[in-house]
Amino acid sequence: MRVAGIGFRSAADLPSLQNAFDQACAAAGVPAVDAVVTEAAKSRAPVFRAFAQALGVPGMGITLSDLQNMITPTQSAKVRDQFGTGSLCEAAALAAAGPDAVLLAARVISGDGMATAAIAVSEGTDT
């Protein structure tokens, strides 16, 4: 299962999320994902729901307790203070992809700086 983790500021718009996602997919060498994920409260944001719908995949939320268990290669003090992990998008992707997940693409930032994305895959899944 390939999963895109998404982080975004409250002022982010659909093109912001799409730009970060497109960069992550290019970095991972994958054309598509099976789901997009973010922190549970953020998953209810209209922009995130519209993004998942535009991609035609489920948009899922990951609890803070699950995010806090993820060790991420990217470290942001601001994100750590807010979510208990170094990178929201990386942690969300890893948590959703399962216990043997690996990152195919670490955090990338949208051109406008409003969104981030990372791609994780369940180990053993064809990329």
Image (tube, rainbow, N blue to C red):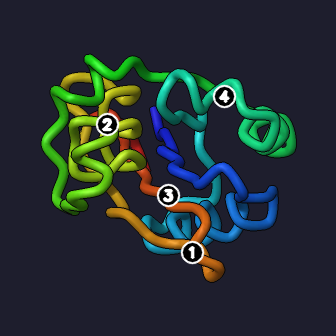
Is label 3 in a helix, a strand or a loop? Answer: strand
Q: Nearer the viewer, mark 1 or mark 3?
A: 1
Circles 1 and 3, Cβ within 8 Å, touching? The answer is no
Element assignment for label 4: strand
Q: Which residue is drawn at the image coordinates 38% and 64% (left, top)?
A: 107
User: What residue does disc 2 label?
Assistant: 83
Q: Position of residue 35 (x, y in %)?
A: 60, 33
Q: How far apart are the two marked residues, 3 and 2, measured between alpha carbons?
A: 16 Å
Residue at 47% across, 30% down: 39
Instruction: Specify the amino acid type for callout 3.
Output: Ala
Q: Amino acid at mark 1?
A: Gly
Q: CA distance from mark 1 to mark 2?
A: 19 Å
Discs 4/2, front: 2
Amino acid beneath label 2: Phe
Q: Quadrant of residue 46?
A: top right
Residue in front for this viewpoint, 91 or 58 = 91
Report the disc number at residue 59: 4
